């Protein structure tokens, strides 16, 4: 960032007064440009005993399987963003009343927050969108575990199949961090079933 989008003045990178983090700031009009984490929203769509997955047609992780999800847009709620992404990537329609928040992941190492909603399909009607090579329903034993695109997808699916056996689907929040050795560590931060 070199120039202010408000006044075209020059931008510097420093800690503004009253703040504790370096920010991009306009030295002409004093506007501070905050860079905040991106929200990725999606669904865990199910039909009967199967889960709907998309095989990615784009990088990152081209050709790998994932839940339908993507970046939240300005002017939409997390739920409506997840529903939109499900339609765009999987050609599947889910109703807001058929969705409930299920998993939330904090990924501070890449400045992202993921939210997945459990959802139900009323019929096995879906098709690959522009960002998917193919879309398919999978039973638990058919999930291509070694071909999943992202750790958050694996964790969400593992939690779902374990919860399904008990018939209880608590909302969980996880923090994901990499160790100095490059090992991804997952920490359960919150569980709505915990008393």
Image (cartoon, helix red, strand yellow):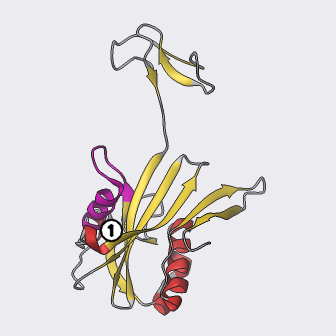
Find out whether residue 56 is within the magenta segment. Answer: no
Q: Is residue 76 magenta?
A: yes
Quadrant where the C terminus lies?
bottom right
Percent coordinates x, y for residue 50 in the rendering? 38, 88
Residue placed most toward the observer, 53 or 42:
42
Q: Which residues are magenta?
A: 70-88
Q: Quadrant of the N terminus?
A: top left
Q: Is residue 1 visible?
A: no
Q: Is residue 171 left or right of residue 119?
A: right
User: Which of the two residues, 53 or 121, is positioned nearer the viewer here?
Assistant: 121
Describe the element under mark 1 as helix, strand or loop.
Answer: strand
Q: Is residue 151 above or below residue 109?
A: below
What residue is rendered at 47% in x and 9% in y?
Answer: 27
Residue where numbered disc 1 is placed = 132
Q: How many marks?
A: 1
Name which quarter of the figure residue 51 lies in.
Answer: bottom left
**Along the viewing direction, whichever of 110 and 147 lies nearer the viewer:** 110
Q: Residues within 10 Å of mark 1 (few under 14, many from 20)?
A: many
Q: Quadrant of residue 79?
A: bottom left
Residue 95 percent location from the top left of the image: 24, 71
């Amino acid at each position: 960032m070199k120039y202010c989008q408000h006044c075209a003045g020059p931008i510097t990178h420093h800690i503004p007064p009253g703040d504790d983090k370096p920010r991009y700031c306009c030295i002409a009009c004093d506007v501070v440009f905050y860079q905040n984490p991106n929200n990725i929203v999606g669904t865990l769509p199910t039909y009967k005993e199967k889960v709907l997955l998309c095989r990615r047609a784009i990088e990152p992780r081209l050709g790998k399987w994932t839940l339908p999800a993507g970046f939240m847009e300005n002017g939409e709620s997390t739920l409506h963003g997840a529903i939109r992404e499900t339609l765009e990537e999987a050609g599947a329609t889910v109703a807001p009343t058929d969705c409930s928040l299920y998993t939330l992941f904090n990924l501070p190492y890449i400045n992202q927050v993921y939210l997945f909603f459990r959802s139900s399909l009323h019929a096995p009607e879906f098709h690959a969108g522009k960002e998917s090579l193919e879309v398919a329903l999978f039973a638990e034993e058919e999930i291509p575990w070694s071909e999943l695109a992202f750790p958050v997808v694996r964790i969400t699916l593992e939690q779902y199949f374990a919860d399904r056996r008990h018939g209880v689907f608590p909302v969980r929040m996880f923090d994901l961090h990499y160790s100095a050795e490059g090992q991804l560590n997952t920490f359960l931060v919150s569980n709505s079933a915990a008393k």
